């Protein structure tokens, strides 16, 4: 005696007849020459001769729907897993404004560096949110030293940036100077003293995680060199810098 049965956990399926019609059923089984099924339309068990049922079409559709259900469930599971992992990352990020890198269970704090404005061989320390007098011409925003104290080997590092103020943020590539690294070049317009910045900005993805907390990472692998995450307002003198280096992978 041949027996075929099927039961759906979440929805009804079509039990197709040879004439193209169908019954909506919760489950069905075949025993010998008959098919027994539970009708969702009439909420009762019924029977029909096996010869009248198109089992091939019925099974094909049922299998396709089951595969679709499993695929949807896998997507939901993956999304929920990603959300849980992201939440665990967020919980490890300090509440203090700044730049942080999370790798596994380790959280690395990228320290804010001191930048200086160099114009006409004069050097001034740029304090956060404290503009300094500038003269017409060119000036450079520099950091002392040829290399950042923090180094990463990941070509596409992911940073969490907790902003202190609602300002612009960017990943920039710094240019080498004489015992310094140049973050920006300022073109200072005469009379108006308007500042036009020249910055080597690296293309990035940015994602707001929560209020004031962002994730930023490069769209393409970074080549070895000196970089920084910067927070700034265009045309203003309030740039803040968190510098790091990308070292060649061993």
Image (cartoon, rainbow, N blue to C red):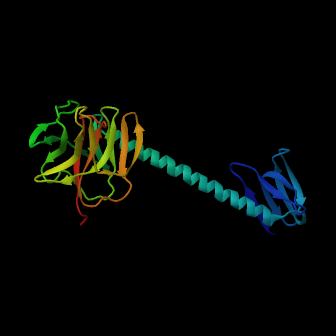
> Which residue occupies the foreground of this view, 228 or 45?
228
Residue found at x 65% / y 56%: 68
Percent x, y of residue 47: 88, 56
Residue found at x 25% / y 60%: 224
> Which residue occupies the foreground of this view, 30 or 166?
166
Percent x, y of residue 41: 84, 45
> Which residue occupies the foreground of this view, 188 or 247?
188
Whether residue 105 is visible here, answered yes or no, is no
Percent x, y of residue 24: 81, 51
> Which residue occupies the foreground of this view, 85 or 142?
142
State left or right for residue 64 relative to residue 94.
right
- Quadrant in which the C terminus is drawn: bottom left
- Quadrant in which the N terminus is drawn: bottom right
Write down the quadrant of residue 163 in the picture: top left
Residue most extreme to the bottom: 1
State left or right for residue 179 relative to residue 230.
left
Residue found at x 20% / y 31%: 131
Residue found at x 78% / y 61%: 58
């Amino acid at each position: 005696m041949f027996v075929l049965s099927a039961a759906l956990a979440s929805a009804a399926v079509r039990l197709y007849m040879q004439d193209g019609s169908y019954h909506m059923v919760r489950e069905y089984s075949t025993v010998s020459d008959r098919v027994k099924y539970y009708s969702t339309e009439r909420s009762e068990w019924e029977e029909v001769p096996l010869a009248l049922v198109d089992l091939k079409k019925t099974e094909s559709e049922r299998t396709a729907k089951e595969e679709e259900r499993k695929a949807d469930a896998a997507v939901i599971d993956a999304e929920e897993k990603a959300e849980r992992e992201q939440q665990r990352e967020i919980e490890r990020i300090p509440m203090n404004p700044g730049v942080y890198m999370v790798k596994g269970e380790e959280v690395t704090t990228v320290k804010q560096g001191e930048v200086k404005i160099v114009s006409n061989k004069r050097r001034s320390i740029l304090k956060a949110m404290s503009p300094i007098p500038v003269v017409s011409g060119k000036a450079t925003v520099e950091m002392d030293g040829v290399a950042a104290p923090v180094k990463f080997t990941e070509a596409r590092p992911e940073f969490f940036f907790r902003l202190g103020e609602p300002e612009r943020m960017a990943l920039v590539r710094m240019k080498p100077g004489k015992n310094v690294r140049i973050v920006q070049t300022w073109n200072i317009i005469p009379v108006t003293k308007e500042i036009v910045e020249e910055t080597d900005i690296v293309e990035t993805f940015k994602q707001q995680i929560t209020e004031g907390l962002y994730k930023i990472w490069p769209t393409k692998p970074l080549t070895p060199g000196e970089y920084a995450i910067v927070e700034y307002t265009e045309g203003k003198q309030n740039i803040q810098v968190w510098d790091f280096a990308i070292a060649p992978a061993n």
